[in-house]
Image: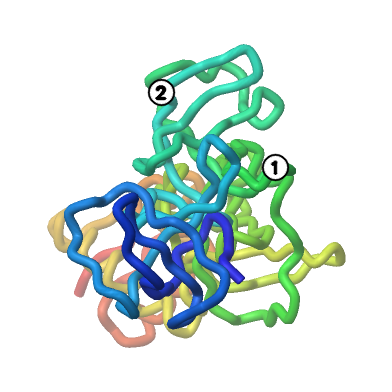
Amino acid sequence: MFKLGCMQTAYVNRLTAYGAYISEMPNGEKEIMLEGDKKTVLEVDMAVEVFVYQNKSDQMVASLKRPLLCVDEIGWLKVVGKVKSGFFLDNQSERDVFLPNDSAKRGVKIGDRVLVKIQLDDRKSLSATMRIYDVLTAMANANIGDTVEGIVYDIKPDMGAFVAVSNQYHGFVPKHELYREIVEGAVIQARITKIREDGKINLSIRQKASEQIHDDESVILSALEKNNGLLDLSDNSDPDVIKSRLNMSKRAFKRAVGKLYKEGRIELNTDCIKMK
């Protein structure tokens, strides 16, 4: 069965004066029309990668052109039109994607680029939503320590970053784990650190402590070299100062400094550290 809103393999069933018809398998009984590109040379039984959608007459058709976003994918689309009930987004396909008012956020206007998730509406047409949190679910079979990939769809400075893991699941990077700048729309690799009672997962963009410590040591040594072997940070320094200067937590700083001291590579003072 053809899947609306998705890229899939199909086969040229027959060629007519009006265009090509494709089916899911060679000589298939159910066929749909291949619209759009007239330049590609097609042959009967040829395998083609197509995007399946509904045209303005609500007929299922296909295109050889892949849109920017397929169903269940998240990304940036440009607002190119507006009607009373919502907005139209350029998906670089034969049809624009509709963003209903109740799925948009306040202040959207023509010309904006908006971060959306694509889904099918009740009429089986492509629809977009900016309210990505509402269309995510808890991740099944999640394990602490697993590495996952996701897209950052919202950042609240006082809380952390909200992540759509695999475009489907709720993920969250707490504020104290944001040791490097990430922006809305960024695709990140993260490690599962906690599975909450509701099935949602907490993430860290840092490596495990045993692995991260080597990176932290390098950061500290690099900072020492840039400051003539002296760094006015110590165990007594404010955590926010350490984070702003070295982009790491005070805990990570103390762990790395302790290891460097044991290795005889630095001297410790009450108000600074020095390179030996």
* Residue 255 percent coordinates (x, y): 48, 74
Q: Is there a contact, CB below 8 Å, between mark 1 and mark 2?
A: no
Marks 1, 2: nearer the viewer: 1
Q: Quadrant of residue 95?
A: top left
* Residue 176 percent coordinates (x, y): 58, 53
> Local crowd at mark 2 within 10 Å, few (<14), some, or many (≥20)?
some
Report helix, strand or loop for mark 2: strand
Q: Quadrant of residue 193?
A: bottom right
Name which residue type carries label 2.
Val
| Quadrant of the frame with the N terminus | bottom right
* Residue 12 percent coordinates (x, y): 36, 71
Closer to the camera in the image, 268 or 27 = 27
The mark found on residue 80 in the picture is 2
Q: Which residue is mark 1?
A: 123
Report helix, strand or loop for mark 1: loop
Q: Is residue 212 left or right of residue 274?
A: right
Residue at 42% over, 51% down:
186
Residue 271 visible (yes or no):
no
Residue at 52% over, 51% down:
53
Residue 236 against residue 103 in the figure, above or below = below
Name which residue type carries label 1.
Arg
> What distance separates the C-alpha of mark 1 from that of mark 2?
22 Å
Residue at 60% over, 81% down:
145
| Quadrant of the frame with the C terminus | bottom left
